[in-house]
Image: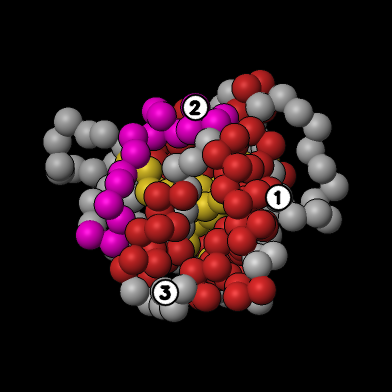
Amino acid sequence: MDIVFILVEVTLPENVGAAARAAKTMGISGLRVVNSDAHTKKEARWLAHASGDILDNIQSFDSFDDAVSDLDFIVASTARKRSVKLHYHPVEELLSFLKSKGKCVKKTGIVFGSEESGLDNEILRKCDLAATIPLRTTYPSLNLAQAVMIFAYELSDIHAMLDFESDSGIQKSTYKIFRERLEAYLKTLAVDKNENLYFRILERVALLPEDDIKLLLSVLNRASDYPENK
């Protein structure tokens, strides 16, 4: 499983540099930015000690949707619990959770919001899972670079725990196919993409392990064979 970190509207170049350093020290090479050029500033290099290659290979996107279009599973990092999601998972459980997906998920993105306001509700809705870093106090909170470091550390064993050969990337992952089948089926049930029920269903299925994903995919494939569902 490949892991990429996505920084949305990051403003401080120093935070990008520190994030690049944190990612590299923990064996994560994929770093993306959305609506930001902070990584191009010289200040980013100051904190990216021995991690200039990560900065050089940062992928820059104008929109969040473009930044996650090739990902199978998206995890939001958030400090605040909001009504947009029912469940918020501690970061220390994230590795075992991703392990439970097995080969159904090939590429996962960890999303971080801006220094000032974090992730907005629209982006949070688009993420499959919300993860938090448990804190002893509500103030002060961790800054962006510190949050990236903690997630990078918690996920540093991802390659050892999920030791299987990556596919070429041409074929869709099982989880992505499952999501597409499920969304199509919800459409036949007149479940609108903008209503809470739709998002609650997607939030719950995101918790499924590999065996259950494959089982429900088989059910959805069979359901689509019935004439009334065509």
Residue at which label 3 appears: 191
- Mark toward the start of the polypeptide (2 vs 3): 2
Label 1, secondary structure: give it. loop
Residue at which label 2 appears: 96
The chosen color scheme is secondary structure
Label of residue 173 in the image: 1
Label 2, secondary structure: give it. helix
205 vs 181: above or below: above
83 vs 49: above or below: below
User: Alpha carbon of mark 2 to alpha carbon of mark 1: how far?
Assistant: 19 Å
Point 49% across, 27% down: residue = 96
Left or right, 18 with respect to 120, comes to: right
Residue 82 placement (x, y as % from top left):
23, 57
Name the amino acid type tagged 2.
Ser
Q: Nearer the viewer, residue 113 or 85?
A: 85
For the N terminus, the quadrant is top right
Residue 141 placement (x, y as % from top left):
23, 43
> Which span of residues is magenta-colored?
83-100
Foreground: disc 1 or disc 3: 3
User: Alpha carbon of mark 2 to alpha carbon of mark 3: how far?
Assistant: 32 Å
Foreground: disc 2 or disc 3: 3
Residue 172 placement (x, y as % from top left):
74, 55
Name the amino acid type tagged 3.
Val
Residue 201 placement (x, y as % from top left):
40, 58
132 vs 83: above or below: above
- 12 drawn magenta: no
